[in-house]
Amino acid sequence: MTAATPTKPRLGRPFGALVTGVLASNASDGFAYFAAPLLVLTITKDPVAVAAVTAVMQAVPAIFGVIAGSLADTRDRRLLMTAAALVRAVVLAALVVLIVNDAVTLPALFVALALFSAAELTFDISSSASVPDVLDDLHLLERAHGVIGAGQQVLQGFIVGPFATLFFAWSAQLPFTVGAVLVLVSAVAVIALRRLLDARDGMAAGIATDGAGASVRTEAAPLSFRERMAGGASEVWNNRPLRNIVIFTIVLVTLVGFGQAAYAYYMVEFLDVPTAVLGLVFMALGVGGILGSVTVHALAARFTRRLTMFAGVFLVAAGFGVVGLAPAGAWAPWVTGLGFFAAGLGSGWWNVLAIAARQRMVPREKLGRVSGFVTTVNAFIAPVAALAGGWVTRMDARLPWYVAAVGSVLAVLLMGGLMRSIDDVAAAPGPDGEPSSNRMSDPA
């Protein structure tokens, strides 16, 4: 007799329903956000008005991030995701009606984008916090986030961007109509997710399992509004390993934002890359991101999470360095494409590992608040980093890429010793004495 070949752990049908909802939602967001600036140009040619679209989308996470995170921890996450999807469908349908009747105004568009962004943020934070809820084994977190990340890269880089602009050229209302249909698909997927979870093992909202697998209902003391708002910051500050990974991630996100803030100017005006080729060059970043997302699980299992994360950061640094050294002229698209590919590959590694590590370190009933806090901090820092990168580009167009590359390497050298918890956390006992990879908290 031959020994049975061990089967590879599967992510499961609940994860399939969740990832379907996430990707449909992400595609809907892409159609809306790619088409919104083009819609502004049909109203006014003022560049300030076009820039205001980006400002509105950045302001909402800064203002609403902590609130969305609190809701994700104090309300049923699947219900929140369904409601957020329906709100976005209504907003997009209203925009379609306004476009058809030639009645779109800038104030109406900005209000619609603000509502859409708030609902999108609620969906994104709730869905991210739900990933551990749908997995039977938290050792699969890297693989799960890798699948989600790869799917998002494919959608945004190869499908949504090109088709959104093409649809808009055919008919201004078409990308918003497609977006509304997709967001309804995400709502249906979330409803199916709820049913799968209920049928799987009784893990409906507000239900946890004890050590014997029996269903028990947990009753938590109600939190005040102030406690909910401060919960994410407090959890990060009081959990030293979590604080280290959050600070490390924020530093890297800031450096990346600073480096590529004025990439369009650098590529077109400084390196003389044709505008028609720019999208294809930047697509290399998406290709690298896809490859990074789908390979990170195997690499982390073989070389440890910490070493894989550091390798990813070094790849980002190398990629930015290559982009900064690219010669102007005919070779520029090829050299910058190579740099973007390396940066995307490395970013896929460290980003997936950072998210998975954070979700292992945080009790499930607090995941939303922590995600909301991190989102809010990044939303405040990102515009500052982008403006600083643009200002430095005025002095030397190559300098932001060098600063981002060197800064990323220094971040690893100075903070590398603080990242050991990434490998330790999966085996560390939780408050109840169980391994954190098996601990099941109230999913809220």
Image: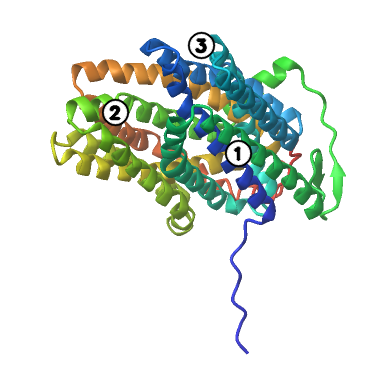
Residue at the bottom extreme of this rendering:
1
Q: Position of residue 1 (x, y in %)?
A: 63, 90
21 or 410: which is nearer to us? 21
Q: Residue at x 66, y 56 (%)?
A: 12
* SS assignment at label 2: helix
Q: Residues under labels 2 and 1: Cα distance?
A: 31 Å
Going from the N terminus, do you reach mark 2 or mark 1 first?
1
Report which quarter residue 133 is drawn in: top right
Q: Residues under labels 2 and 3: Cα distance?
A: 28 Å
Q: Residue at x 17, y 30 (%)?
A: 272
Amino acid type assigned to the residue bearing label 2 in the image: Tyr
Other residues around mark 1 within 10 Å, as few (<14) / some (14–19) / many (≥20): many
| Pointers 2 and 1 in contact (C-beta within 8 Å) | no
168 or 413: which is nearer to us? 168
State left or right for residue 159 relative to residue 223.
left
Q: Residues under labels 3 and 1: Cα distance?
A: 25 Å
State left or right for residue 128 relative to residue 206.
left
Report which quarter residue 372 is drawn in: top right
301 or 14: which is nearer to us? 14
Amino acid type assigned to the residue bearing label 1 in the image: Leu
| Pointers 3 and 1 in contact (C-beta within 8 Å) | no
Which quadrant would the C terminus be assigned to in this image? top right
Amino acid type assigned to the residue bearing label 3 in the image: Leu
**Residue under pointer 1:** 182
**Residue under pointer 3:** 106
Labels 2, 3: front one: 3
Inspect this view and state whether residue 279 appears. Answer: yes
**Which labelled disc corresponds to residue 263?**
2
